Image (spheres, grey):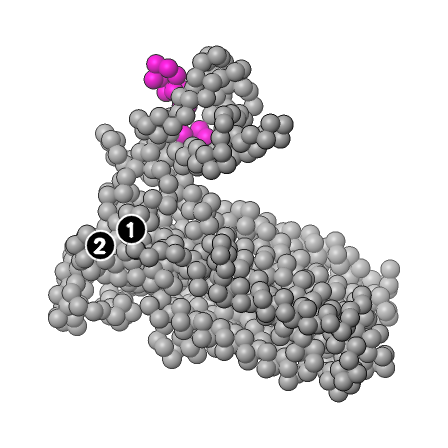
Amino acid sequence: MKAKKYTFFIIVAIIIGLLILAVFGAPHVKGAKEMRFGIDIRGGVEAIYEPVDLDRAATSDELNAARSVIETRLDNKNILDREVTIDKKNGRIIVRFPWKSDEAEFNPEKAISELGETARLTFRDSEGNILIEGKDVKSSRAVMDQQTNQYMVQLVFNAEGAKLFEEATAKLIGQQLFIFMDETYISGPMVNQKISGGEGVIEGTFTLDQAQDLAEKISSGALPFSMTATSHNTISPSLGSGALKVMVMAGITAFALICLFMLVFYRLPGFISCIALTLQLAVQILALSVPQFTLTLPGIAGIILSLGMGVDANVIINERIGEELRSGKSLPLALKSGYSRAFASVFDGNITTAIVAIILMALGSGTMLSFGYTLLVGIVLNFIAGIYTTHKLLLSLINFKAFRNIKLYHLPKERKTIPFYKKRWGLYSISIVLMVIGIASCFINGIALDTTFKGGAMLTYTYTGDLNVEDVSRLATSTLNRNVTGQITEDLGNKQQKIVLSLAGTDSLNAKDQVKLDEALDKAYAANKLELSESYMVEPYIGKETLIRSIMSLVIALALIVVYVWVRFKKIGGLSAGAMALVALGHDILVIFFTFVVLRIPLDTNFIAVALTIIGYSINDTVVIYDRIRENMALNSKNMEVLMDDSLTQTLTRSINTSVTTSISVLIMYIFAYVFGIESIKVFALPMMMGVLSGCFSSVCLAGPLWVSWKNSKKFNKGAHIKTA
């Protein structure tokens, strides 16, 4: 790979252009200022949906089916930050979702129209007999006929729908099949033949917009009954109105400190790394703002992880270049060899993390989908920015004599081999102590679940004046000895301000506790005239189906990681390597879980975001170490313990530096949240910090020594030696 002197300036100019575009946008290209932020950052709309013309109470299964349809619809519109829960007693569905990025009027009625039709879809004959219902439609989308170049609407039915569709088309050959939303006619395609197999198309002189509109209406009609929004309110940002500004300040500060660290430690290659990270950040912003993916805390977690992995790729490459220079190679050869030898580590680490991202996107929903998308975009950018771009920039600069000075490059000192295996029981004991403390805390503190997982009671109070929602939540929590979160809403009709208190748990608030809470609120906020206007129980925000899909996606992702490691690292016993990587991951998830328990932080979407981040971070760290073991094994047959100790020692600087740069981001986020009093970010950042430290510890101190112990116990090789293939 060659590069001219001017290549550096061309690439930098392109990056500056992309950065300006990402920040300010352009005609038809939305930038950071027009990004769609989540409810927690910008606030949004609350709509309460109730069945229409239903002469009975809606069943639990029907409400869950309606909820699933609404969640799928929100996923399809990239509205990934939302709360959709069920008030089973009153037969209602409560939906909360963020404002559009270009919202100016903040009109809830206009905003809820984005959810689409809430009417019941039916397919009828000319006499009005219902032949198929919307619940029988699996999917509907606009497609183009490759022969006529005309747009059509493709229908896919479920098993029951396929049977009914076949019967209906057999009966109506030469006649129209009428499609209605409630009693509103929307289409009447002519049936040309009997259609089997559960798939069909609606042909016509459609434009793309017309075909998409009809497809969306058909897809939205899978509700088991017609619904209408009986009330709607605006809701305040759950992180506070200044949270976005604080997070932007924290992000800029963290990015500057990471760049400073890279410059001081790696010098000229560190400077190049900063340019590459700028490219990655700019494109990542555009990847969110252009398609209007909702950015919320889990999405921010995905960005932090992908940027951390971007730094990691640069650290691995820069360490390799330094090793090659230390061995006496010329600068051009050191660059060539350094990038070549670093590629396998970067590739394997990113692919294992990409597996998690792809599975989450394929099977996940809501926050899982948001996290998976931001992470996958970041991984793709790691290859573009971290490998290709930095290589081109460095090759371009060394055409200048001034940049061929070896003093501008980091030459790592040769470390004395650390006997990790010999000290393994001391390292294991640290982990055992952490587990014992965590388990004991579960019995002492109990495990607190937020309404996200447990559901609970919702208390709505009207009030006057100004209230600090976090202060009210803390008062309610201490009064009831039960986790309480609050959110400010406003009825735009009468401008009545309300505060909604969510009490996690399956029990409603009894009369005694209600009086106790009312008295505490009256005493603390007498001037605000708080008055209870409504109370009801809600189901968990993460529905049973969504939770099952999320768990299944993680299980599949972890299984595929084991398979990948098994195949890629056969020379070191891939199955055992994959198994020990899973042990390290389990350790890290438990550390995060116990951090929430010890600090008495209720498990909510923050826990999901942190756990997913550390899974990606930890597996990447472990795979990089495995890659060095594999490389050293190919170079020299050594005693198993010595091989592992040498490999861990050689990659230790990389492991520490990656943890330092990732920790800088999280620590700065925590400091800003602490200074500005944003509790929700604090309870996100602190467990994340523990997870990063645990990820580094488990990869270095657990996965490797456990792998050797496994090999020794199985006597994989006689005399406990490994030979090259």
Q: Nearer the viewer, residue 271 or 637?
A: 271
Q: Residue furthest front?
A: 27
- Is residue 133 found inside the magenta-colored segment of the image? yes
Q: Residues within 10 Å of mark 1 (few under 14, many from 20)?
A: many
Q: Measuring from the top left, give residue 672's x and y in whole percent.
A: 42, 77
- Is residue 706 found inside the magenta-colored segment of the image? no
Which residue is tagged 2? 492
In the picture, measured across the screen, residue 683 lies left or right of residue 418, that is left
Q: Amino acid at mark 1?
A: Pro
Q: Nearer the viewer, residue 723 or 376?
A: 376
Q: Quarter of the image holding residue 283?
A: bottom right
Which residue is tagged 1? 108
Q: Secondary structure at mark 2?
A: loop
Quarter of the image with the C terminus is bottom right
For the point 29% across and 69% down, the residue is: 470
Q: Measuring from the top left, give residue 664's x and y in whole percent.
A: 53, 77
Q: Quarter of the image holding residue 235?
A: bottom left
For the point 53% across and 31% down, the residue is: 151
Q: How far, Cα to Cα, is label 1 from label 2?
A: 8 Å
Q: Measuring from the top left, give residue 579's x and y in whole percent.
A: 66, 58
Q: Secondary structure at mark 1?
A: helix
Evaluate if marks 1 and 2 touch, with contact meaning CB atoms under 8 Å apart.
yes
Q: Amino acid at mark 2?
A: Leu
In the picture, measured across the screen, residue 501 lies left or right of residue 139, that is left
For the point 26% across and 61% down, the residue is: 488
Quarter of the image with the N terminus is bottom right
Instruction: Tell which circle, 1 or 2, labels the residue nearer the N-terminal end.
Output: 1
In the picture, measured across the screen, residue 2 lies left or right of residue 234, that is right
The answer to whether residue 722 is visible is yes
Magenta stretch, residue numbers = 123-141
Q: Residue furthest bottom?
A: 407
For the point 84% across and 74% down, the residue is: 333
